[in-house]
């Protein structure tokens, strides 16, 4: 991607041999050949309800190595009530919290597990703010792999619980994600483990791109006008763009959506780089309630900036208060429970709607990247505490009458 060279799959495991760790590779396909097999009609006949319905467009040589969990083909809801509230008639929510380990990251981990098995490796590793790790742990548990996981000590308890329940070997780093990332790289080199870490492994974006394939198919091949997604390292947004480019190359869509990357104000190096128009990404010490995107050094930053530039989209930052509000609105009017980073894309939409930047009839897709149960503590911060009452009808009546006063009960 930096030097423009092309390599065969057996010439490197991860990054460009010339450019080193910054030379993240892009997987290139023979679209002529794939286009003969993968068509709108062939997909319409395909009964597979998972990411593997697009296996012809994935870097998978042996289908027998595909893990047995049902990953992806998550619902795309036409969110009419939520849309009404925002004045949008064509608002869609893609709920990727519905994946087996409850986050978008399952799409990538599934591919990682196949690649480790192709190489005959027994241990797969990653550094993660939490979701890539719990996802990898779950997918590894579904096959014959050990997951060695590096997480920062601030990862929410539910994500750590997932790791332990799935039997992963967990190293909880007394430091932040950026430090966990570097340590994981060193350990993978030292022990010969297969590395799933974002922005090292070229196949992760291939898994992530399947969300774009699904969205366009679920919209009967009418590409959305805009897609909103939260951004930490930038691998998801880069993957979404790759999926759109694949679809365009195959003639399955005839125009591109604009990608809107949304970061938390306290961890917004890409928003900063975007505002200066440069590819120099200033590192920062991240601080946000949205742990999954609490990233100060975006490992896939260059791809993430290019995805937004090429799609003629934009980057936007939202405050933690705006993220908490987005969690509330998304739950109450959209019936989707998102973790903070899962609701951050929606927070970006709320912001642009308020600024009058979205036309009422735009076809808008918001990706929800992680389920709210991943971080119950923050959900309670967003939604407030429940009423505690003594066990008497009198106390019930007191509370219900206060609902009536607010028009909440019938
Ligand atoms: C729920 C959720 N949303 C968004 C992201 C951001 O993805 P990326 O780091 O690829 O930008 C992550 C990554 O951990 C995540 O877990
Ligand atoms: Zn290179």
Image (cartoon, grey):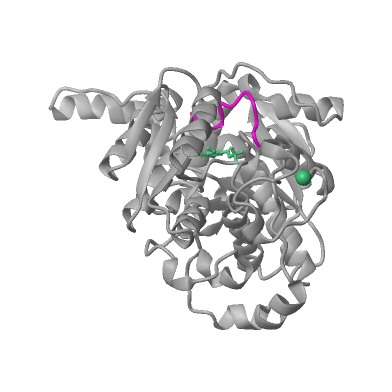
Q: Is residue 194 visible?
A: yes
Q: Is residue 328 visible?
A: no
Q: Position of residue 308 (x, y in %)?
A: 77, 43
Q: Nearer the viewer, residue 152 or 374?
A: 152
Q: Is residue 39 above or below residue 132?
A: below
Task: Give yes or no for residue 294 being in the magenta stretch.
Answer: yes
Residue drawn at x 53%, y 80% as measured from the top left: 46
Would residue 358 appear left or right of 120 to someone viewing this image?
Answer: right
> Looking at the picture, how far across and down is residue 30, in whole percent?
74, 71
**Quadrant position of ligand 1:** top right
Q: Nearer the viewer, residue 314 or 276?
A: 276
Give the answer, above or below, for where 69 lies relative to 333.
Answer: below
- Residue 283 found in image quarter: top right
Magenta residues, start to end: 291-299
Direction right: furthest residue: 277
Residue found at x 43% / y 39%: 191
**Left-right relation of 217 to 376:** right
Q: Quadrant of residue 18?
A: top right
156 vs 39, left or right, is left
Q: Main secondary structure of the magenta part?
A: loop
Q: Residue at x 49, y 71 (%)?
A: 62
Q: Position of residue 152 (x, y in %)?
A: 44, 25
Looking at the image, residue 178 lies above or below residue 302: above
The quadrant of the picture occupied by the C terminus is top left
């Amino acid at each position: 991607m930096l030097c423009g060279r092309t390599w065969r799959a057996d010439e490197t495991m991860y990054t460009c041999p010339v450019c080193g760790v910054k030379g993240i590779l892009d997987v290139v396909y023979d679209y002529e050949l794939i286009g003969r097999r993968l068509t709108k009609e062939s997909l319409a006949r395909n009964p597979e309800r998972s990411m593997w319905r697009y296996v012809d467009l994935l870097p998978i040589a042996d289908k027998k190595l595909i893990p047995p969990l049902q990953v992806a083909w998550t619902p795309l809801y036409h969110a009419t009530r939520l849309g009404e509230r925002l004045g949008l008639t064509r608002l869609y929510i893609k709920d990727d919290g519905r994946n087996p380990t409850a986050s978008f990251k399952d799409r990538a981990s599934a591919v990682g597990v196949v690649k480790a098995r192709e190489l005959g490796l027994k241990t797969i590793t990653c550094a993660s703010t939490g979701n890539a790790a719990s996802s990898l742990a779950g997918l590894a548990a579904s096959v014959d792999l050990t997951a060695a996981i590096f997480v920062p000590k601030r990862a929410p308890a539910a994500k750590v619980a997932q790791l332990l329940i799935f039997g992963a070997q967990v190293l909880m780093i007394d430091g932040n994600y950026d430090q966990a990332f570097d340590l994981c790289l060193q350990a993978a080199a030292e022990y010969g483990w297969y590395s799933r870490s974002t922005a090292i492994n070229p196949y992760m974006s291939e898994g992530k791109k399947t969300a774009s394939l699904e969205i366009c198919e679920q919209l009967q091949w009418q590409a959305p006008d805009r897609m909103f997604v939260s951004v930490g390292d930038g691998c998801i947004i880069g993957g979404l763009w790759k999926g759109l480019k694949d679809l365009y190359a195959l003639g399955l869509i005839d125009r591109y959506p604009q990608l809107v990357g949304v970061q938390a104000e306290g961890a917004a190096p890409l928003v900063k780089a975007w505002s200066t128009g440069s590819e120099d990404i200033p590192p920062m010490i991240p601080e946000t309630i949205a742990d999954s995107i609490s990233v100060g050094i975006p490992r896939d930053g260059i791809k993430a900036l290019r995805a937004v530039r090429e799609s003629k989209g934009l980057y936007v930052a939202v405050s933690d208060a705006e993220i908490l509000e987005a969690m509330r609105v998304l739950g109450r009017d959209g019936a989707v429970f998102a973790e903070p980073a899962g609701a951050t894309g929606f927070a970006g939409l709320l912001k642009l709607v308020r600024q009058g930047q979205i036309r009422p009839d735009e076809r808008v897709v918001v990706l929800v990247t992680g389920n709210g149960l991943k971080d119950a503590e923050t959900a309670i911060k967003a939604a407030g505490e429940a009423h505690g009452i003594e066990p008497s009808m009198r106390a019930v009546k007191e509370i219900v009458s206060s609902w009536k006063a607010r028009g909440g009960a019938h």
